[in-house]
Image (cartoon, rainbow, N blue to C red):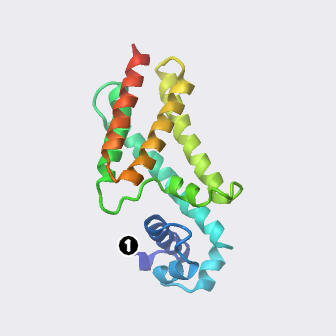
Amino acid sequence: MSSGNLPAKDRILDAANRLFYSEGIRAVSVDAIAAKADLTKKTLYYHFKSKDDLIAAYLASRDQPNLTLFKKWFDEADGELPDKIEAIFLNLAQSARHPKWKGCGFLRTAAELANMPGHPAMKVGAAHKKKFEAWLLGEFEERKIEEPHELARHIVLLMDGAFSTVLVHHDPEYILSAGRAVKSMVENVSR
């Protein structure tokens, strides 16, 4: 189905995803999103009462697909738990090599909204990061890993640090380094 055949709300979200991710939320106007969706601004505001609501919906639309992808990479990886966790980072590094890759949309949005902690998109982004951490925690608890909360939090910190560092240096090797560190940490508690 081409984007022109999608319902108006889906077309708006598709356009917002493309533009916000590639150019940033502050750089993209509501007019640009409406034009990209081939709709009027009035139609956009019928579905989203403000740009802030659209930004939050943009991130919400990325939440489950991203989490599902991380789980898929984990489940499809060969080996034991340390290999499966590292596989997430290996796949992220591969993704980071694509010319259109711009990093973590949640972190980039948070950086743009750092002075607006109550923004609805900040809440969506925080919830997404907590869901990822909770999923890791569940995997660790299921396997009776020592200090599962701390390990899950360390992995989130390494992942977000790797995302940020790759944006600065444009070098996916930082994600691979984070993946090796994560693998080592998980090996140490899996013994």
Q: Is residue 96 above or below residue 37?
A: above
Q: Residue furthest top?
A: 191
- Indicate left or right for 100 with 35 as reference: left
Residue 80 quadrant: top left
Which quarter shows the C terminus?
Answer: top left
Q: How many marks?
A: 1
Q: Residue at x 32, y 50 (%)?
A: 171
Q: Is residue 172 left or right of residue 20?
A: left
- Residue 125 % position (x, y): 58, 52
Q: Amino acid at mark 1?
A: Met
**Residue lying at 51% horizontally and 17% vertically, measured from the top left:** 146
Residue shown at 51% from the left, 35% from the top = 135
Q: Position of residue 103 (x, y in %)?
A: 42, 54
Q: Quadrant of the N terminus?
A: bottom left
Of 188 and 47, nearer the camera is 188
What residue is rendered at 56% in x and 77% in y? 29
- According to the image, label 1 marks what residue? 1
